[in-house]
Image (cartoon, rainbow, N blue to C red):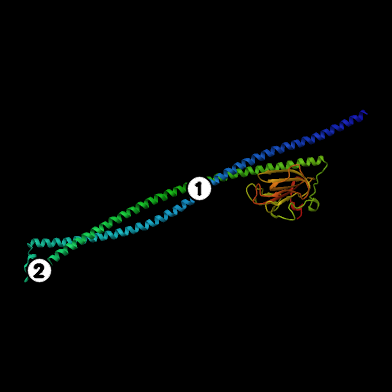
Amino acid sequence: MRKRYLMQIAMLCALFLVLTGSHTQAVNYDREIREEEKKQKSFEKKAAGLQKEIQEIEKVREKSLVYIEKLDKKTGELEESLEELGKKIAKANTELKTADRNLKQAQEEEQKQYITMKKRIKYMYENGNGEYWQIIFGATSMSSLLGRSEYVEKISNYDNRIFTNFRKIKSEVSAQEKDLQRRRNELLELESETRTEKQYVTELKKKKKAEIKKYNKKLDSSQERADEYIRQAIAAENKVEELLQKKQEEIDREQGEEGDDSDEKASRSGLRWPLRGSAGRISSSFGPRKSPRAGASSYHRGVDLAIASGTPVLAAGSGRVVTSTYSSSAGNYIMISHGKRLYTVYMHCSRRIVKAGDTVSKGQVIGYVGSTGISTGPHLHFGVSKNGTYVNPLNYVSR
């Protein structure tokens, strides 16, 4: 009797140890999950802060680029003005040379006329105006006298007119030369001002280009840091996913569900296509790929199904929702456990309509297609994990 009693106690103790051990393991998983989620959120917050900073820098940079564009336009206008001014100055110089020649010619003609008149006056003076009186008294009649007087008067008037005309021409040419010189000086002054303005614009443009170079350097640095934070956030997210699977496997073991290490194909998995019918174009296949954008993995752990935003997302099989949450990389995503260490993942949903712990049936609507997280457009990322490793979903479902 006592022996049987002791055996019962031993069995209870063993059961207690198993239960407490499982509980302790579950608690450890929960603690690790919380720690990784905390890391993930911290990295996502840092990345978001840097992205905001990048956006602000890009705004300022864009304003500088627009300003440089305006300066380029202004430089072009100033160069056109300088070219036009150069033509006007060249024309003014030509006109000045012509005016200068005309002035010299007028001065020479005036000087010639002056010399001629001076000689005539000197001759008349030296000859006692005899010639003048000879012309007058040489007349043989009154009409001849009048004619000769008129002739002498005409000679005198002609001399005066010629002399006056030369002086007038000289004055006009001189005034024209002064006006041309004034206009030329104004053009030269305007040219100087335009060149000074062009130099100022050039220096300002040089300064703005230096600023843009600085902005580009800062953008590259900030983007690099942001990408690193995103990579760390994704690593933490993957760790959370791994821990969630391990926790679920622990639960499955407690419930007597052993894992199956075989590589089940579509005919044996019982999974269906995650969209109605065979909808969705495969825009990115499983396996190595060129990263579509910063922060995205270069090894694709699923397939991307391009389809319109708002399309219903279906549970590929019956099971229990392990997680239904949001992350900066996966956006709105859901993980479902189907037992025997088989999991399906649905990422980038516009919204989720199931929560962690919910039981879902095969073909049930669990969310809707979107483009949340790191995404280049509306699509569903569909992944399958078997025995802790992501496998090609096309080997587990058929269209």
Q: Which mark is residue 333?
A: none
Residue 314 location in percent, x, y?
A: 74, 50
Q: Is residue 52 visible?
A: yes
Give me the residue at 63% from left, 43% from top: 228
Q: Is residue 368 left or right of residue 71?
A: right
Q: Which mark is residue 64?
A: 1
Q: Nearer the viewer, mark 1 or mark 2?
A: 2
Q: Is residue 221 visible?
A: no
Give me the residue at 42% from left, 55% from top: 79
* Amino acid type, label 2: Leu
Task: Say few, some or many: other residues with alpha carbon within 10 Å of mark 1 (under 14 / 14 to 19 / 20 or more).
Answer: some
Give me the residue at 50% from left, 48% from top: 64
- Assign the C terminus to one quadrant of the image: bottom right
Disc nearer the start of the sequence (1/2): 1
In three-dimensional space, the C-alpha distance between marks 1 and 2, rounded to whole angstroms, equals: 92 Å
Say above or below: 214 vs 73.
above
Residue 164 location in percent, x, y?
A: 19, 60
Query: What kind of element bears circle 1?
Result: helix
Residue 233 location in percent, x, y?
A: 66, 42
Task: Say few, some or many: other residues with alpha carbon within 10 Å of mark 2 (under 14 / 14 to 19 / 20 or more).
Answer: few
Residue 238 location in percent, x, y?
A: 70, 43
- Assign the N terminus to one quadrant of the image: top right
Tell me where residue 21 sits by quadrant.
top right
Q: Which residue is mark 2?
A: 146
* Amino acid type, label 1: Ser
Give me the residue at 50% from left, 50% from top: 66
